[in-house]
Image (spheres, helix red, strand yellow):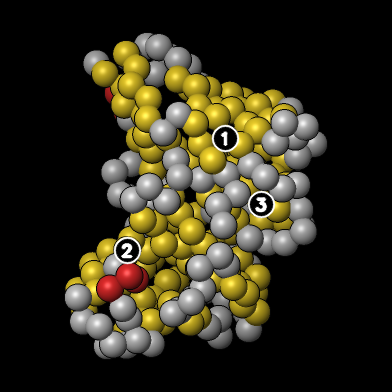
Amino acid sequence: EAQVTQNPRYLITVTGKKLTVTCSQNMNHEYMSWYRQDPGLGLRQIYYSMNVEVTDKGDVPEGYKVSRKEKRNFPLILESPSPNQTSLYFCASSFIREVVNEQFFGPGTRLTVL
Amino acid sequence: SQQGEEDPQALSIQEGENATMNCSYKTSINNLQWYRQNSGRGLVHLILIRSNEREKHSGRLRVTLDTSKKSSSLLITASRAADTASYFCATVRSNDYKLSFGAGTTVTVRA
């Protein structure tokens, strides 16, 4: 089944404790992206990747890191989480046919930073 | 910064009625995409319209795009209770590969 998976789905952590949220897709998509969703703000793009070893900042990259060592995986790293990073996080992937096409979204990771 | 802005923020309609929501954006785009989200779940792609297209249909969905006004509309005809969800527009700008989402329109369809 074609899908985007994220782990964990729920996470409660404390300020400063490094964490990684994994994202994996099985559709051979070139483009992968991370978003955060906060009430009243919609989705905001954190980072995106056009292909292996190619990553770029979205609109809200501060406090986050990503890597794209393999085409299928795009982990999101919070080196020192803070309470303002409490949010619902989505990973998504798509083909690039000259431009970014329809995004396939993962189920989301609800992160709480105390 | 958010590129797309949906209007209205919330919409409540009776089953069988049509629902229309609008999206305005600020810069030149390559394409505009509409998504649906059910209650905190992952977004589901509904329809993509390119900048050189003016109208597109998919089942009960009709999307229009007016690049001169930098706006798009999504029409859901003959709404059903299952259409209750939040709807988001997302723009892909002409000069990069970022996606910008609006804050969404929450649609409630009453039985």
Q: Which residue corresponds to mark 2?
A: A87
Q: Which residue corresponds to mark 3?
A: B92
| Image: A76 above or below B94 | below
| Image: A24 above or below B56 | below
Q: CA distance from mark 1 to mark 3?
A: 13 Å
Name the secondary structure under disc 2.
Answer: strand
- Label 3 crowd (10 A; few <14 / some 14-19 / many >=20): many
Name the secondary structure under disc 3.
Answer: strand
Determine the image quadrant of residue B110: top left
Dot in front, 1 or 3: 1
Labelled disc at residue B91: none
Q: Residue at x 60, y 49 (%)?
A: B3
Tell me the quarter of the image containing the N terminus of chain A: bottom left
| Image: B95 above or below A69 | above
Callout 2: chain: A
Callout 1: chain: B
Labelled disc at residue B23: 1
Determine the image quadrant of residue B5: top right
- Label 2 crowd (10 A; few <14 / some 14-19 / many >=20): some
Which residue type does callout 1 highlight? Answer: Cys
- What is the x, y in percent for residue A110? 27, 64
| Image: B69 above or below A35 | above
Figure disc tally? 3
Q: Is A14 displayed left or right of B10 in the figure?
A: left
Q: Residue at x 45, y 45 (%)?
A: B103
Residues flagged by tags 1 and 2 on a common chain: no
Tell me the quarter of the image containing the C terminus of chain A: bottom left
